[in-house]
Amino acid sequence: MNYRARKSRAARAAKTAGVDGLLVTHLPDVRYLSGFTGSNAALVLVGGRSVLFTDGRYTAQAKEEAAGTKVVIAPKPAVTAACEWLAEAGVKRCGFDATQTTVSSFEAMRKAVPAKVRRGMFVAVEPLVAALRQVKDADEIERIRAAATLGCQLFDEALGYLRPGMTELEVAATLEHSARKAGAEAMSFETIVASGERSALPHGRASLAKLPKRGFVTMDFGVVLDGYMSDMTRTVHLGKSSPEERDVYDAVLEAQEAAVLAVAPGVSAGEVDEAARSVLRRVELDKWFTHSTGHGVGLEIHEGPRLAAKQTQRLEPGMVITIEPGVYMPGSFGLRIEDMVLVTAKGHEVLTPSVKAWIEL
Ligand code: ZN
Ligand code: ZN
């Protein structure tokens, strides 16, 4: 990972934002810029310098992971140590990401610096590091690709064990057990297994409900490999389906494929959303598509860009996004299909090529 290049991009962004230093406290941002994965950390970028603050539990780990960054070990919250350092270094205007700073953390920042320099020292700026993180570099794409590939393997394996009568939790447990055995550090989020009527819940966490003899099973899951996450959804049908179930599945699949096809550099996030939504509108199912079409994925499961109606942000090569339209009819059934898609220089590449065609088990 080229942390030096990332840090200089972040420092340039801070300069453009009109501040002479940047305080980074959101842990995925700290990891992105320095490689450090500990739970108490703050990173400051000032001039050409970068300093990472953490505590004694992480002395060895910080030296190893954040090799290219100066490390300061202090027996106090990292944000306090970082702000004391900033005041001593004479930084007049230090940017921070207000979207990742709690009120109490902001109070701690202010308390750490002498009253006479406090005024105007901390300047809320746009989430600069989050903006950089939207476009993945080659190292990140490699890791995301590995996580997505493992996700596909887990789904293919699930096709062999899904049975009526199994609880949703048993399905999740089996899938997660395989994920761990294959090297996953964690799941990206709580595995969603929603079957039968529960498939109408867009975020139906696996429960004690038993898979029905006839009905949909939606599985939405992801794994973490080397810090990077995957995210995919497939919906299969157990037993004989009704014509309505089949029609709705075909419509969601058509919407999903239309949105994937729309992904290319320069296209707006809103246009991709509309590509999916317009297909469902044509068959009057759009009122049941109650969420946005997708989101960025990387060190976190939900990152920018957001693919929703009217979003004007343009896609850029290196972005990794999900495309996940769904239809949810309360009391009846629902389904979703989700892929991870890499925006390339010429168009796109689907990172989760598991079968999407109708599957009846
Ligand atoms: Zn998902
Ligand atoms: Zn998703």
Image (cartoon, rainbow, N blue to C red):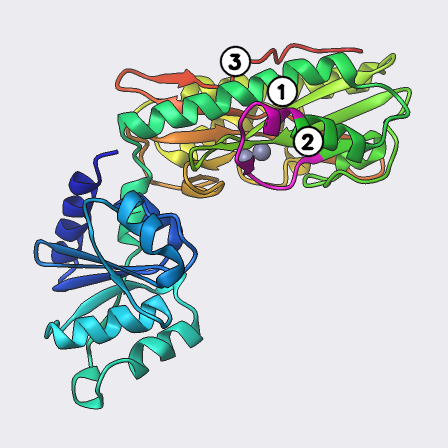
Residue 88 place in picture, x, y as percent: 14, 76
Q: Is residue 111 above or below residue 227?
A: below
Q: Is 358 left, or right, of 113 in this rendering?
A: right
Residue 356 place in picture, x, y as percent: 62, 13
Q: Residues within 10 Å of mark 2 (few under 14, many from 20)?
A: many
What residue is pinned by disc 3?
353
Q: CA distance from mark 3 to mark 1?
A: 12 Å
Looking at the rendered image, the quarter that the N terminus falls into is top left
Q: Secondary structure at mark 2?
A: strand
Q: Residues within 10 Å of mark 3 (few under 14, many from 20)?
A: few
Q: Are marks 3 and 1 in contact (CB under 8 Å)?
A: no
Q: Which residues are magenta?
A: 178-192
For marks 3 and 1, the one nearer the N-term is 1
Q: Residues within 10 Å of mark 1 (few under 14, many from 20)?
A: many
Residue 154 is labelled as: 1
Looking at the rendered image, the quarter that the C terminus falls into is top right
Q: CA distance from mark 1 to mark 2?
A: 24 Å
For marks 3 and 2, the one nearer the N-term is 2
Q: Secondary structure at mark 3?
A: loop
Judge whether residue 139 is colored magenta.
no
For marks 1 and 2, the one nearer the N-term is 1
Q: Hey, what amino acid is under mark 1?
A: Leu
